[in-house]
Image: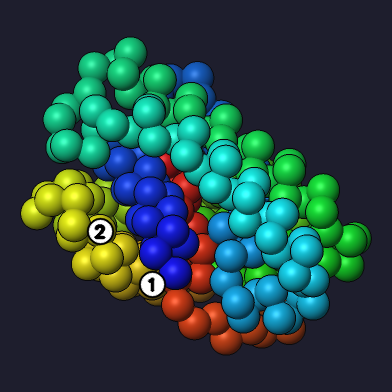
Amino acid sequence: MRVRTVFLCLLAAAGAMASAQGMPPGFKMPSMRYNPALLMNPDVQKDMHLSKDVSGKVMQVMMEEGMKMAPALLGAMGGKKQSPAEQQKMMTGMMDAFNAMQKRTIAYLTPPQRQRLHEITLQSTGASALLDPMNSREVGLTSAQSTKLAFSISQINRRHAAELGSPMQGGSSNMAAYGAKAGALAKKTKFETDAVLDKLLAPAQKAKWLHMQGRHLDLKGAAGMGGMFGGL
């Protein structure tokens, strides 16, 4: 579906630019308890037993909030270096839209569905989900482990964001190819950051982390673009 492809490309662009430029001073990471973009994935909808009515409402919310990112991204999408004020405006728009997505989509889910979305979010996001203090505390990360993980994820994300480039390179008609490249790099990012986490965790922490992710779901397709806000 074209609208879904364009929307996921927009999310990929937002995450890539945020990773490449870094978080402005004073910015707070969004909650990584739930990735609402996952609710657009048919495999997730089936696993969570979402009704057509709920799926439709979630799609509407995602489009409404996702499109709010567009104005903040227009300048950056051309590859132009942003001023601090422009960067802050873009990041504010992204964070507000993402937080609104979480709040509005979660409202349509039952408590068991929320728990399952949390588990699938951890699975698809991987190590980047532990940048969220709540998730980090649950695993039992030490301050030293958290600092090392955050630094490693930031370095990996910046490298892959530079490789991804701007979605407008090659023209707007190149969005499908950009989306495919973004999806491949998201998987590569997750693989590399998960490898870093595996070396950091003690056996008891690994067991806890595995338990938090619940029953494994083999996701196909874009799968919500993985941890798009990891290591901002």
Q: Residue at x 31, y 18 (%)?
A: 86
User: Which numbered disc, 1 or 2, marks the residue that appears first in the sequence?
Assistant: 2
Q: Residue at x 78, y 64 (%)?
A: 53
Image quarter hosting the C terminus: top left
Name the mark on residue 71: none
> In this rendering, is residue 218 above or below 228?
below
Estimate the x, y position of residue 181 in percent, counting from the top left. 25, 67
Residue under pointer 1: 187
Residue under pointer 2: 175
Residue in front for this viewpoint, 46 or 134: 46
Q: Is residue 205 visible?
A: no
> In this rendering, is residue 96 above or below 134?
above
CA distance separating discs 1 and 2: 18 Å
| Amino acid type, residue under disc 2 in the picture | Met
> In this rendering, is residue 78 above or below 165?
above
Instruction: Check disc 1: other Cα within 10 Å, few if <14, some if 14-19, many if 20+.
Output: some
SS class of the residue under badge 1? helix
| Amino acid type, residue under disc 1 in the picture | Lys
Q: Is residue 128 visible?
A: yes
Where residue 5 sits, quadrant-wise, is bottom left
Does 118 sit left or right of 29 as displayed? right
Image quarter hosting the N terminus: bottom left
Where residue 79 sits, quadrant-wise, is top left
Q: Residue at x 33, y 33 (%)?
A: 73
SS class of the residue under badge 2? helix
Estimate the x, y position of residue 72 in percent, counting from the top left. 38, 28
Colour mapping used in the image: rainbow
